[in-house]
């Protein structure tokens, strides 16, 4: 008598047949789960890369719009004859100021953001530097945001166009 669930012609369960069939089934299930897991990971990675790309494009567009506002602001300062000064940076912690070798104007009253004469946007808060008070500390320009201080504490964030208009009034130039 043949019992199809036993895997042998004698009707008795075959240890070897059961092991091979069980092993093959478990390998196929494992392989299928691994394939599904890898496929899902690849899909999630693709989605994440797309979101990163969209964010970079959005930031680049925002920086381009902000740079137009800054260039207009710098042109108004130059035409009004507002004097420049050497911008200094401060360390994240501690006190003191570091020379930067950059001339321009401070954008915020706390001197944490400045603009170079060429319209470059500088964040003037830097990591502490050994002997920074005695030598020039390099500060690289960064892409300007439309919202200065985004992600900061309440009351520290301000739209760039409002900040520029306020600074023009502080310099006595008038309405932007």
Image (tube, rainbow, N blue to C red):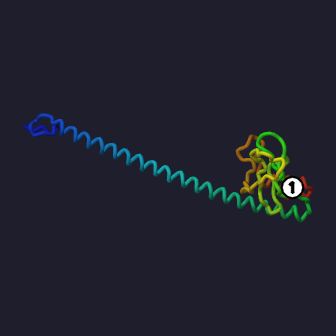
- Counting from the top left corner in percent of width and height, residue 8 is at 13, 39
Report the side of 62 relative to 164 (left or right): left
The foreground one among 69 and 127 is 127
Residue at the farthest left position: 1
Report the side of 140 relative to 37 (left or right): right
The residue positioned 76% from the left and 47% from the top of the image is: 126
The residue positioned 86% from the left and 63% from the top of the image is: 76
The residue positioned 26% from the left and 43% from the top of the image is: 24
Element carrying mark 1: strand
- Counting from the top left corner in percent of width and height, residue 123 is at 76, 51
Image: 153 above or below 163: above
Image: 138 above or below 127: below
- Counting from the top left corner in percent of width and height, residue 55 is at 61, 54
- Counting from the top left corner in percent of width and height, residue 99 is at 83, 52
Screen quadrant of the N terminus: top left
The residue positioned 69% from the left and 57% from the top of the image is: 62
Residue at the farthest top position: 12
Are there few (<14), some (14-19), or many (20+) residues within 10 Å of tag 1? Answer: few
Report the side of 1 relative to 175 (left or right): left
The foreground one among 122 and 133 is 133
Screen quadrant of the C terminus: bottom right
Q: Which residue is mark 1?
A: 86
Give residue 122's quadrant in the image. bottom right
State how many labels appear.
1
Give residue 121's quadrant in the image. bottom right
């Amino acid at each position: 008598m043949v019992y199809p669930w036993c895997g042998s012609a004698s009707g008795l369960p075959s240890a070897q047949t059961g092991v091979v069939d069980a092993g093959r089934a478990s390998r196929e299930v494992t392989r299928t789960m691994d394939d599904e897991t890898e496929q899902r990971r690849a899909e999630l990675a693709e989605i994440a890369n797309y979101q990163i790309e969209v964010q970079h494009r959005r930031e680049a567009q925002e920086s381009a719009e902000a740079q137009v506002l800054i260039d207009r602001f710098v042109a108004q300062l130059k035409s009004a004859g507002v004097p420049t000064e050497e911008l200094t940076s401060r360390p994240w912690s501690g006190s003191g100021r570091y020379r930067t070798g950059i001339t321009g104007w401070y954008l915020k009253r706390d001197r944490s953001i400045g603009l170079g004469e060429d319209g470059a946007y500088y964040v003037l808060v830097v990591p502490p530097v050994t002997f920074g008070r005695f030598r020039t500390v390099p500060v690289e320009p960064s892409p300007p945001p439309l919202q200065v201080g985004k992600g900061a504490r309440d009351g520290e964030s301000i739209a760039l166009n409002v900040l520029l208009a306020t600074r023009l009034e502080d310099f006595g130039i008038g309405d932007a």
